Amino acid sequence: LQTQALSTATHEDRVQSELAALRQRADQEMSDIKKSTAELYQRQNLMLSDSKEEALAELERLRNRLSEVEKARDIAVREHMELATSVEGQIGEARSVAKIKTMELDRLHVAYEDAQSLNRQLRLET
């Protein structure tokens, strides 16, 4: 009976020892998993931070480009308006000159016809 008790005690000691080794291995694996997960999260956070910085830099570059394009558009619109105003003024001036020239031409045409008529009368009288 004593041998059986000794055998049972030895067996229990072995089981306890194996359990302790399993617990230690499980604790070590959990520690390794936590460490790996923490490193993974740290890498992901770093990558996300880098991506955010790149996106913000791209946003700033695009905003600057938009500002430049809007300024160029405003300048082009202003120049277009100035040219349109200038062209309209030139057209108005050309119409006025054309009207004056037309009136002068009509006056000269009447004077020419009067001269022709007078010339015919003079020829008839002579």
Image (cartoon, grey):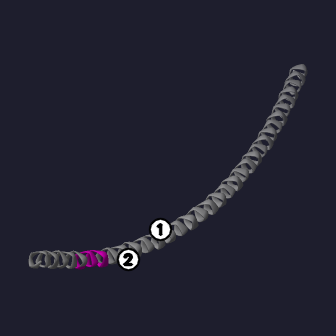
Relative to residue 17, is residue 91 depicted above or below? below
Q: What residue type is labelled 1?
A: His
Query: Which residue sits at x=14%, y=79%?
Result: 122
Residue occupied by mark 1:
80
Query: Which residue sits at x=21%, y=79%?
Result: 111
Query: Which residue sits at x=62%, y=58%?
Result: 62
Report whether 30 appears left or right of 101. Answer: right
Local crowd at mark 1 within 10 Å, few (<14), some, or many (≥20)? few
Mark 2 and mark 1: span between their CA atoms? 20 Å
Q: Nearer the viewer, residue 1 or 8?
A: 8
Q: Looking at the rendered structure, which numbered label has been put on residue 126?
A: none
Provide the secondary structure element on which disc 2 rests.
helix
Residue 27 x %, y %: 81, 39
Q: Looking at the rendered structure, which numbered label has been put on residue 93?
A: 2
Instruction: Please give the range of residues in magenta.
Output: 100-107
Q: Nearer the viewer, residue 77 or 66?
A: 77
Q: What residue type is labelled 2?
A: Glu
- Quadrant (top left/top right/bottom left/bottom right) for the N terminus: top right
Report whether 14 appears left or right of 103. Answer: right
